[in-house]
Amino acid sequence: MARADYTIIGGGIAGLTTALLLAERGYRVRVYEERYPGAGATGAAAGLLVLHLKPQLIEIALDSLSIYKRIAGKGYIFNMGALLFTTPSCARGYEEAMRSHGLAAYRVDEERAREIAGLPLRTMEGEEVLYVDEYLVDVGSLVSRLHSLLGEAGATIEHAPGSIEAEGETIIAAGAWSHLLAPELQDKLILYRCQAAAYEAPRPGPALEDDTHGYYAVTHPGGDLVAGDGANTIITRPEEGYTPDQWEPYEILERISKRIPGAEEGYPRRIWSAPCSTTPDSLPLAGTLREGIHVITGFNGLGITLAGGVAARLVDYLEGKTRSMGMLDPARPMPPPPPDRPPEPYDECPPHSNT
């Protein structure tokens, strides 16, 4: 292969999508991945593409959806919908933001929620229930298709267990390892363990997004209920993210049982975890760090939701089609990091109760 125009460090969803978008525009691209394509946080993703976000992030998520459908095909991306349990004020905000983008978002009572879920769900006093659009992405098929299309476009993916010799412009897309590659990121990234588990337990038809009890749950095509709580324990080294908390799945199952009677009789069949990263303001980092060095990272557990749309914006920026990365700019002012827990991803409606 001729000398690369772009060297991308990291073969997760963000690095692979950025690489493909550049290669499709005629650039020579080389991707280096320490483990294997789709490793790290991508490999541990439940595959949810959520749309109950702030308005400017909904646009990014919809762009991700469009890109993934083009890459993987509609047969690997499903609109299963979700029941969202949240506060009345948050429900109003989500409803307005989603409807302004032509998305489904409407309130349902307990009886209708039970009909949609196919389960005897409990609703709690002081909460609203929304039915919203939400997608499930077959992550394995998406990564496999990205790998194939990169080869067809003339890009290469190389195993890089140690140091590499970058050519052309460098894009750091190494997730929780990104701060080790650029000193500018040392104070901008918070590392934590992402974790999920597959359960033998009652399985709802749509996904459940439970702000009240602080978890998400989705029925995967294979039949398992997959659930997690998004943010997890802060870690100091990325490698720590691969050691799951063996007790957390049981604690999450207890939360699920407050919503789904009988869930407490289930059990976790498989537990997996990976290192994730976020920023003090919970927005991704994408843009230029210094001449010839760029970054795309910090997705706070929503890499599947946002990586495609952020990658598209980064490629436009690198080509000069846009002058600024705006709210994603790595040089933006940051608030102080929270002392003991990663910030909630991208919304102002964190769990308000664990009872």
Image: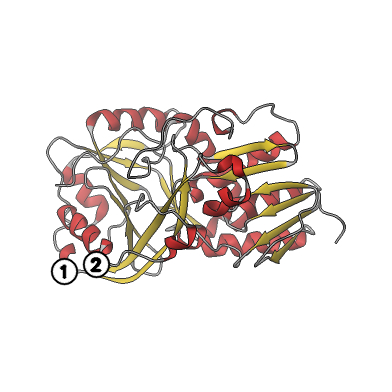
For the residue labelled by badge 1, is the local secondary structure a helix, a strand or a loop?
helix
Instruction: Examine the rendered structure and indicate whether residue 266 appears above or below residue 120.
Output: below
In front: 113, or 10? 10
- Mark 2 residue crowding within 10 angstroms, few (<14) / some (14–19) / many (20+): many
Asked if the residues shown at circle 2 and circle 1 are in contact, with their CB atoms under 8 angstroms apart, the answer is yes
Question: Which of the 4 image quadrants contains residue 1?
Answer: bottom right
The residue positioned 17% from the left and 58% from the top of the image is: 257
Relative image position of residue 349 (x, y in whole percent): 30, 35
From this view, report whether residue 345 is shown above or below residue 36.
above
Helix, strand or loop at mark 2: loop
Percent position of residue 46, x then y: 42, 58
- At a point 69% along the width and 62% down the height, the residue shown is 163
**Residue nearest the observer in this picture, 92 or 273:** 273
- Which residue is identified by label 2? 201
| Up/down of 145 relative to 258, above or below | below
Which residue occupies the extreme left position in the image? 125
Amino acid type shown at disc 1: Glu
Q: Is residue 209 above or below residue 55?
A: below
The disc, 2 or 1, on the residue closer to the chain's N-terminal end is 2
Relative image position of residue 66 (x, y in whole percent) = 58, 45
**Residue denoted by label 1:** 265
Q: Residues within 10 Å of mark 1 (few under 14, many from 20)?
A: few
Q: Amino acid at mark 2?
A: Ala
Picture quadrant where residue 296 is located: top right
Q: CA distance from mark 2 to mark 1?
A: 7 Å
Tell me the residue at 51%/45% (across/down).
Answer: 298
